[in-house]
Amino acid sequence: MIKLENEVAQLEQPKSEIKYDTGLEGKDLLSKALLNLLAHAGHESKNPTIYITSMWRSPAKQANAMYDNISQGVIISYAEPGRIVTQLIQAEIKNKTPKNQIIQLAEAKINELAEQSKLVSKHCITKEQYQKLNVVDISKTRTPNPRDLAKALLKEAKVSRIITPFGELSTYGNDKRVLIDVKEPAIHVEYSV
């Protein structure tokens, strides 16, 4: 009986609304536990709506996302495979290669690196892998209290990484799961399912 009452109490807790940017793929891959965490952390941090701007990406979507960022001057701090694709896109933009060709070249490079087990981004993994590690980006411009959201999310042990452009590491209690990257265009959250 107590267990049932706890479950009912959890269901009745106030939550923030979750909204998705248009055209996102992979909503069916997101864990209900992550969505519930986002809704509760949003409410706790006084963010009435959580806007998910990115989730799972195919290699084509990853190439397009990287092109869009780079062409706008946003260079994210990727690991080596991501830097390789970034450099390829930058070189092709400099050479005035048409956008669609650049994206095709970047997609081919992403696939080539994936065949070598080198990930360009944790957004761009197989669907099977994504079901074990959900990765979402949350809008930084539509989140009124981004630091508080990150702090609320860090209370959950299954949050394995947050990359945020806001604050200093001390803002988050020097939690090793937090990476501050002022160039990050969103609040990036990794959740182990």
Image (spheres, rainbow, N blue to C red):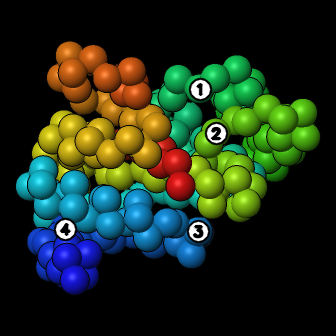
- Label 2 or label 4, whichever lies nearer to me, is 4
Q: Are marks 3 and 1 in contact (CB under 8 Å)?
A: no
Nearest the eye: 47 or 183: 47
Name the amino acid type tagged 1: Tyr
* Residue annotated with mark 2: 121
* Residue annotated with mark 4: 16
* Residue ID at (75%, 55%): 126
Residue 175 in the image, given as x and y percentages of width and height:
31, 23
* Residue annotated with mark 3: 29
- Label 2 or label 3, whichever lies nearer to me, is 3
* Residue annotated with mark 1: 78
Q: Tell me the crowding category of disc 3: few under 14, some 14 to 19, or many 20 or more residues within 10 angstroms, Cα based.
A: some
- Label 4 or label 1, whichever lies nearer to me, is 4
The answer to which quarter of the image holds residue 147 is top left
Residue 23 in the image, given as x and y percentages of width and height:
53, 72
Q: Secondary structure at mark 3?
A: helix
Give the tally of numbered discs.
4
Q: What's the distance in space between the residues labelled 4 and 3, CA to CA?
A: 20 Å
Name the amino acid type tagged 3: Leu
Q: Secondary structure at mark 4?
A: loop
Q: Are marks 1 and 2 in contact (CB under 8 Å)?
A: yes
Q: What's the distance in space between the residues labelled 3 and 1, CA to CA?
A: 24 Å
